[in-house]
Image (cartoon, rainbow, N blue to C red):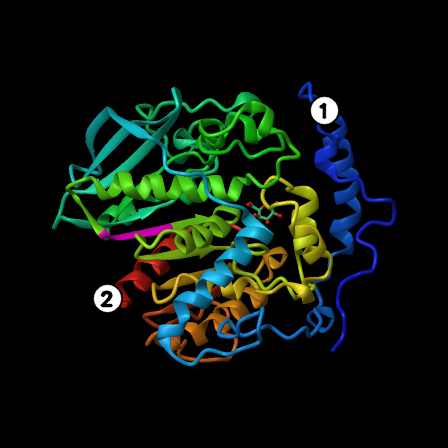
Amino acid sequence: MSYPFRDKFLPWPRTPLFTLAKPDGDLKPFWEAHARDFAYVQPNTNFAESAAGDLPIPSTLVNPDTGARIATPEEWPALRETHLRNITRILYGELPPKPQSREVEILKEKEVFDGTALQRILKLTLCNDGKRHEVTVLCYIPKAAQPVPAIVAMNFPGNHGCTDDPDVPLSPWRDQQKPRGDGKSRWNFRLLTDAGFAVITCARYDFYPDDVFGRKESVFRLFHDESELTPRDRQYTAISAWAYGYSILRELAASFPEINAKDIWAHGHSRLGKTALWTIANDPGWAGAISNCSGCAGAKISRRNYGETLEVIDHFFPWWVTHEALPYAQNPAILPFDQHTLIALAAPRPVLVTSAHEDQWADPMGQFLAVKGAQETYQLLGGKPLPSQEYPALEEVLMSPSLGYYERHGIHDVTDQDWTNVINFIRQTR
Ligand code: GTR
């Protein structure tokens, strides 16, 4: 067994980047150090399979504290709790509590797609201890054969970035506002509604603005004072705030008469793919999850030194994971779980993991190995293994009613091909 991680992450003393974010909001020193460190880390990232190392991946069925292996489905819930606790402590932190109340206001509703679907835009206000937190939600709901299954998927550019429709209000995000339609190639709403799926989305920044100062404007503000939400308060992570948001959207979707409350799926791309897996680990109400190109701290095995590593995430995105992650990021061999354990927390609910050939940063092989590693738990609970244990050919979609994996041509992205695979995957789970 070889220890695959470099001795030195950086050739100069490591300054935790979040400590460089000035209390007055000045991000210049943060971004300068970020750029300097990344310019070293990226060319020094390993993309050779021969150097990925061979750290053994722990079984999801073995208790990391006692070494005892479970053999029956009845023993899984207690072991699951242990895994969930470890993943909470070391990676993502706790999700916020439920708000005391919520208000829903329909802002706009109209027929779209030649009258085959409804577009509904809502303002959702979460209320707690006299504080209010607003989220704008965009929904597309097919009119045929209701109640329909739904996909909940947060977006990157804001709702207005997912479509050219001028009726969708611009979501403001400080200086980073995206133009209307900017990310629409990732959102073929019509393809989904034509296939009979509703889609519910909102901007990720409505739950946690995705930067080092995002915490104080995030949904955590309903439960904490601003003084507790500084860049150092790393127990309150963006991934947990988004996961919380996903479940708030699921509960909203479940309240629509047009939607089948038992058939709501969490979908996320990249950092939101990490989130989709964490979401369903925390909320039994989901039917299943789709992780699209989620990579490190998502569906990729952290014990592999290939592409992005946990150390990279801890350093460059310190608001995604807790401060507890660092010693494990530096030495993943001591992690009491790996990311296949996160997938196993979804069991027996189906999970599809997608990857892309030109997205080696996200380590397609590491994501396949995580799906493979999660199978033991699925099988213990009566689920079906993948149809093959070999790495699939490019474009070949491996799927069983429990788990799916594929690597397509192309880049880190969400394409119509991905959505078609999602639809096919969900259909064959029935
Ligand atoms: C990258 C990050 C990845 C992935 C991606 C994304 O910069 O290294 O872990 O999450 O962002 O979310 O688009």
Residue 309 or residue 49, whichever sits in front: 309
Asked if residue 383 lies in the magenta stretch, the reply is: no
- Residue 258 x/y as whole percent: 16, 43
Q: Which residues are magenta?
A: 262-266
Q: Amino acid at mark 1?
A: Lys
Which quadrant of the figure has residue 23?
A: top right
- Residue 162 x/y as whole percent: 40, 35
Q: Residue at x 49, y 43 (%)?
A: 240
In this rendering, the answer to whether 121 lies above or below 145 is: above
- Residue 338 x/y as whole percent: 57, 64
- Residue 18 x/y as whole percent: 70, 35
Residue 408 in view in this figure = no
> Are the two marked residues, 2 and 1, in contact with CB atoms closer than 8 angstroms?
no
Considering the image in quadrants, where does the C terminus appear? bottom left
Residue furthest front as drawn:
66
Residue 171 in view in this figure = yes
Q: Residues within 10 Å of mark 2 (few under 14, many from 20)?
A: few
Q: Is residue 61 left or right of residue 24?
A: left
Q: Is residue 39 left or right of residue 373?
A: right
Name the residue carrying label 1.
Answer: 22
Residue 12 or residue 49, whichever sits in front: 12
In this rendering, the answer to whether 105 lies above or below 401 is: above
Q: Amino acid at mark 2?
A: Arg
Q: Residue at x 38, y 56 (%)?
A: 289
Q: Residue at x 38, y 77 (%)?
A: 379
Tell me the distance, in whole angstroms, between the alpha carbons under discs 2 and 1.
Answer: 52 Å
